[in-house]
Amino acid sequence: MAGLPKVLLSGFEPFNGELLNPSQEVLAELSGERIAGHRVEPLLLPVDFEAAPAALLAAIERHRPELVLCTGEAGGCTGLRLERVALNFIDARIADGAGRQPREIDVLAGAPAAYLCRLPLAEMAEALRDHGVPAELSLTAGSYVCNAVYFRLLHALAGTGTRGGFIHLPYLPEQACRHPGAASLSLATQAKGLGIALGVALGQ
């Protein structure tokens, strides 16, 4: 498998008092997997406005993937949330892992206001639902570290042949028990869903 083209799959460490992050757990499930003739290379990112984008861009340079899919936690969502838009905007509700809490600033000065994802998100969402995985399309990845990473990703890939996207993941059941009434999805279902989403993206 060493000679296979690569998919770079990123997730985040736990944050905001959580003991788990579904995006980190899914990395362990899919690391090294072969999907549509591509090998999945995992990348765990810190919840840090500066370190996370830097680590992602360095990994892209190192692995030269054909596709980059970033994932992160969105506690409260009911299924996989496929993000259509990355905004050049930060407004942190809570501090990042380094203690920074920037408010109402650009992700990258002088860059466009937003980027649209060029992956077949509607087809990906439909395939997920057809396989029993809850999924929805979203017009905003928020204004925290997830969106900052997403924006820096699409900015870096603009004009290249590499495509990128971002999927938010719901709580795991182990997390939801600490948040009464919050939706959750099992790790097995989340990993299955990301595998399906990657397969559709790589097939088009």
Image: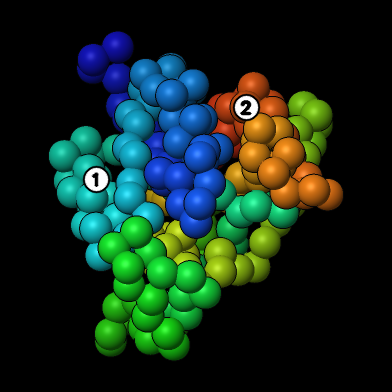
Front residue of 148 and 38: 148
In this picture, residue 198 sits left or right of residue 156: right
Q: Residue at x 33, y 50 (%)?
A: 46
**Residue 135 seen anywhere in this rendered image of the structure:** no
Q: Is residue 111 above or below residue 18?
A: below
Q: Residue at x 30, y 55 (%)?
A: 52
Total number of numbered discs in the rendering? 2
Residue 190 placed where, x, y %?
63, 32
Residue 171 placed where, x, y %?
65, 42
In this picture, residue 94 sits left or right of residue 136: left
Q: How is the image coloured?
A: rainbow
Residue 79 placed where, x, y %?
73, 44
Question: Residues at badges 1 and 2 in contact (C-beta under 8 Å)?
Answer: no
In this picture, residue 154 sits left or right of residue 190: left
Tell me the kind of residue under disc 2. Leu
Which residue lies under the disc numbered 2? 187
Q: Residue at x 60, y 68 (%)?
A: 140
Q: Earlier in the sequence, mark 1 or mark 2?
A: 1
Q: Residues within 10 Å of mark 2 (few under 14, many from 20)?
A: some
Which residue lies under the disc numbered 1? 60
Q: On the image, which quarter does residue 113 sit in?
A: bottom left
Q: Which mark is residue 177?
A: none
Quadrant holding the N terminus: top left
Q: Secondary structure at mark 1?
A: helix
- State the residue lying farthest toward the top: 1
Q: On the image, which quarter does residue 142 sit in?
A: bottom right
Per the model, the C-alpha gap separating discs 1 and 2 is 26 Å
Front residue of 107 and 51: 51
Tell me the kind of residue under disc 1. Ile
Mark closer to the observer (1, 2): 2
In this picture, residue 199 sits left or right of residue 101: right
Quadrant holding the C terminus: top right
